[in-house]
Amino acid sequence: MRLSASQIEAIKQETEHYFGARAEVWLFGSRVDDTAKGGDVDLYVRAATGDADQLAAARFVFLARLKRRIGDRRIDLVLQRSGGEELPVHELARQRGIKL
């Protein structure tokens, strides 16, 4: 996994703060491959809340704050609300990703 311990901790803290104490987060995509170079940070978050309006507002603040904490790099966020529809990308992120 190509993230530092401090970057992982920042992701976990911001996820909990914006998406709830029971939220779960996975890193997936090129950053899980230690032999790859570069690449954006792909995150899948299973939120602890099902309130779509609350999650939409939290998404933008989460991304801005996380960028300041882990550095100016592209961050892609796949967000699943509690009780929300299960999409193929959600399953793929959990299967091929690393839970943080």
Image: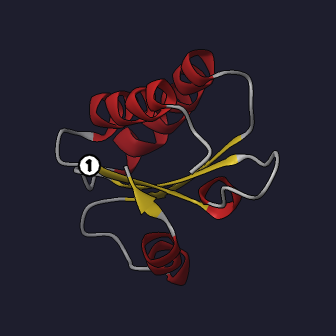
**At x 57% / y 39%, what residue is drawn?**
3
Pick whichever, 88 or 31, lies toward us: 31
Q: Quadrant of residue 69?
A: top right
Q: Position of residue 85 (x, y in %)?
A: 38, 77
Pick whichever, 37 or 57, lies toward us: 37
- Give SS at disc 1: loop
Q: Quadrant of residue 95?
A: bottom left
Which residue position is annotated with label 1?
23
Q: Amino acid at mark 1?
A: Ala
**At x 26% / y 49%, what residue is drawn?**
23
**At x 45% / y 31%, what residue is drawn?**
5
Q: Is residue 43 above or below residue 71?
A: below
Pick whichever, 50 or 18, lies toward us: 18
Q: Is residue 11 above or below residue 89?
A: above
Q: Is residue 91 above or below residue 77?
A: below
Q: Position of residue 35 (x, y in %)?
A: 74, 58
